[in-house]
Amino acid sequence: MVTGFLVLSGNPAQAAYYNTYSDIASTPNTSCCTGAQGFAAGSTYLYSIKNRTNYDDTSVIYRVHKTSGARVLMTNGTNGGTTNPWLGHANDMTIVDIDAQHHMFVVTMKDSGAQLVKLRYDGTTYYHAGSYQLRLNGAVATPSGISRVSVSSTTIAFMFKSGRTVYNGSLPLRANSGTIELTTAFTLQVDGALVNGATVPDLNTFTNQGFFYDAGKRMLYYPLTKANRSIVLVYRNVLPTTTGTAPAATDLSFRITSSKYSTLFEIEGVGISDGKLYFNTNRANADGSFDGVHVFNDYVAA
């Protein structure tokens, strides 16, 4: 674990910077799945997908108790076993309850077939429940991020993200197939964003990861990574109707630069549960790779 936790004060008022984390559980390689990808935080459990790196043809899903760290490799109730062939790159996911049943919606980043897959899950077993195509201006869209915005008696509304651009999209509550037409919403400021009160000169060369939108607080969390550095930018007062460029918060930021995992410290996805910011990673050093799920120390969403 990296050391040192810092809270800034002064202008901007009560600016906060978080740069330590605690491990909750590891997510070891299994069945050829070696790369941590999509992540979601539920009320009790954290969910992390691992896929077959460079092939995107096989995935597994880990369920981790967010307090005890108890880890279970979830079972594929549709085909049997623990792997599945449906999720592609599985870069990000979001949780939606439909008719009191839990579901995961996973973006595949496939340029053909389904760009979004729905899984229904009960305990530690999941089932294929739906596949959807995503379109933008009539062409296939392959967003790398997804987050639930709202659920009504008829409709699920999502935000999707590709690079720095956020899109809106929705589908009927109980639809198990169909096409989601995306509309462009806004762009996330990256260049010039403040991290611990200063800009990061090469931030525009970092890799985009998934994201999380907290609809109740109108806050968006956006991880970017490069080698052993991970940064989470935060955006306030974000709505589906936001347009133009959403500015990154100047008074709240997260960064881990890892000496223990000097080859790679890559946050893949983030999520809020009970006000805490959880995340999963690909981590590596000279001794190998060590994927897992974690929580930022001391952060509680305002």
Image (cartoon, rainbow, N blue to C red):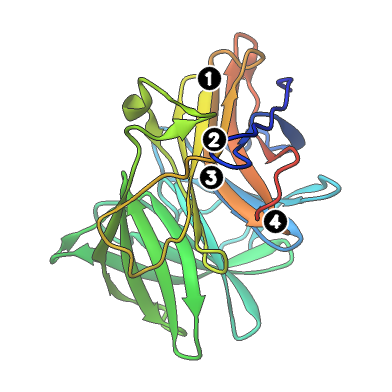
Please tell me the numbered disc located at residue 228: 1
**Is 228 left or right of 71, judged from the image as shown?**
left
Looking at the rendered structure, the secondary structure element under dot 3 is strand
Q: Which residue is mark 2?
A: 267
Q: Position of residue 205 (x, y in %)?
A: 32, 25
The residue depicted at 58 percent of the width and 13 percent of the height is 262
Considering only order in the chain, which callout, 3 or 4, is on the residue closer to the N terminus? 3
Q: Which residue is mark 4?
A: 275
Residue type at mark 1 is Asn
Are discs 2 and 1 less than 8 Å apart at CB?
no
Could you tell me how far apart the alpha carbons at marks 4 and 3 are, in whole angstroms? 16 Å
Could you tell me how far apart the alpha carbons at marks 4 and 1 are, in whole angstroms? 26 Å
Q: Is residue 82 visible?
A: no
Are discs 3 and 2 less than 8 Å apart at CB?
yes
User: Mark 4, mark 1: which one is toward the viewer?
Assistant: 4
Are discs 4 and 1 less than 8 Å apart at CB?
no
Front position in the image: 241 or 182: 241
Please tell me the numbered disc located at residue 269: 3
**Is 209 left or right of 254, judged from the image as shown?**
left
Quarter of the figure that contains the N terminus: top right
